[in-house]
Image (cartoon, rainbow, N blue to C red):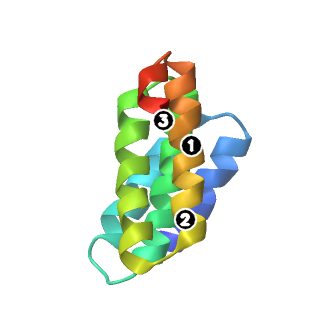
Amino acid sequence: MARSYDIIQMLYYNLENYDKGIYYGETAVKWLRTIDDPLWLGTTLNNLGMNYFKKGNYEKAKDAWMEALAIGKKTGNVEMEVSQMLNLGELYTATGAYAVLQ
């Protein structure tokens, strides 16, 4: 069920309907927190952060990406770590937080 919600989240993201994307992403995260599937949780948090970012809710995007980064580190998933670092770099650039990038 949670994976389906994450897929729907991304469909709405691609349609630029970020509010619905956030709804389905948050629902997916809630489901995933009840099971032991950290890689899918990290992926879903990444996608949720993308929806928040596009809505201009940078703090929630940062929170989602930081949690996904922690999951990547904990599980040894380098691809997930790098993806989150790139997302956070884009966020810090968009918000003018250049000092964080150093």
Residue 52 marker = 3
Look at mark 1 in the image and give the residue it sits on: 87
Residue located at (49% from left, 73% from top): 40
**Relative depth, front residue between 19 and 60:** 60
Q: Residue 80 — which label?
A: 2
Residue 101 versus residue 12 in the image, above or below? above
Which of disc 2 and disc 3 is earlier in sequence? 3
Residue located at (47% from left, 43% from top)? 22
Q: Position of residue 6 (x, y in %)?
A: 54, 62
Query: At label 3, which amino acid type do we have?
Result: Tyr
Could you say where residue 78 lies in the image, as x and y percent from the top left? 55, 70
Residue at figure coordinates x 47%, y 31% from the top left: 102
Q: Is residue 76 above or below residue 28?
A: below
| Residue 19 visible within the image | no
- Real-space CA distance between mark 1 and mark 2, rounded to the nearest whole angstrom: 11 Å
Determine the residue positioned at 65% across, 43% down.
13
Could you tell me which secondary element the residue under label 3 belongs to? helix
- Judge left or right: residue 71 versus residue 50: left
Say what secondary structure mark 1 lies in.
Answer: helix
The earlier-in-sequence mark between 1 and 2 is: 2
